[in-house]
Image: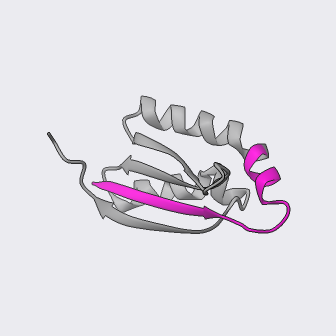
């Protein structure tokens, strides 16, 4: 099962600092997920000035339990980088 996650950073004055502090852990986690075949692709959402304001990730898990296990350990969630996030079922087109 594939999923698209869109996470939106907080808008308070410490939001960018939280993101940058959690970023190395987030990248290490994503690299491990990619090695296991769970991370398909992702990146930062930017505002008109090029400032990071959120993230989008395309993920793949066998079931929703695996998805939830990842969410429980995702640094941008545990460090409260993302103020809110949305996850939807998704299918990567085979073209």
Residue at image coords 43%, 56%: 67
Q: Please tell me whether residue 11 is drawn above or below residue 65 in the rendered image.
A: below
Q: Give the magenta-colored segment's residue range.
A: 1-20
Along the line of sight, which residue is nearer the eye, 26 or 67?
26
Image quarter of the N terminus: bottom left
Where does the image place residue 28, in percent across and percent down from the top left? 61, 33
Residue at image coords 14%, 39%: 95
Q: Please tell me whether residue 66 is drawn above or below residue 41 in the rendered image.
A: below
Residue at image coords 37%, 61%: 64
Along the line of sight, which residue is nearer the eye, 69 or 55?
55
Is residue 17 left or right of 93 when viewed as pictured?
right
Is residue 38 left or right of 21 when viewed as pictured?
left
**Quadrant assignment, res 39:** top left
Magenta stretch: includes residue 9: yes
Is residue 49 left or right of 2 when viewed as pictured?
right
Along the line of sight, which residue is nearer the eye, 2 or 6?
6
Where does the image place residue 57, in percent across and percent down from the top left? 46, 50
Total marks shown come to 0
């Amino acid at each position: 099962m594939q999923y698209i996650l869109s996470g939106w950073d907080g808008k308070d004055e410490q939001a960018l600092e939280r993101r940058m502090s959690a970023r190395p852990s987030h990248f290490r986690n994503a690299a491990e997920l990619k090695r296991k075949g769970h991370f398909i692709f992702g990146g930062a959402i930017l505002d008109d000035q090029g400032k990071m304001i959120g993230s989008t990730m395309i993920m793949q898990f066998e079931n929703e339990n695996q998805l939830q296990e990842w969410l429980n350990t995702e640094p941008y969630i545990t460090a409260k980088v993302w103020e809110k996030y949305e996850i939807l079922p998704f299918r990567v087109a085979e073209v």
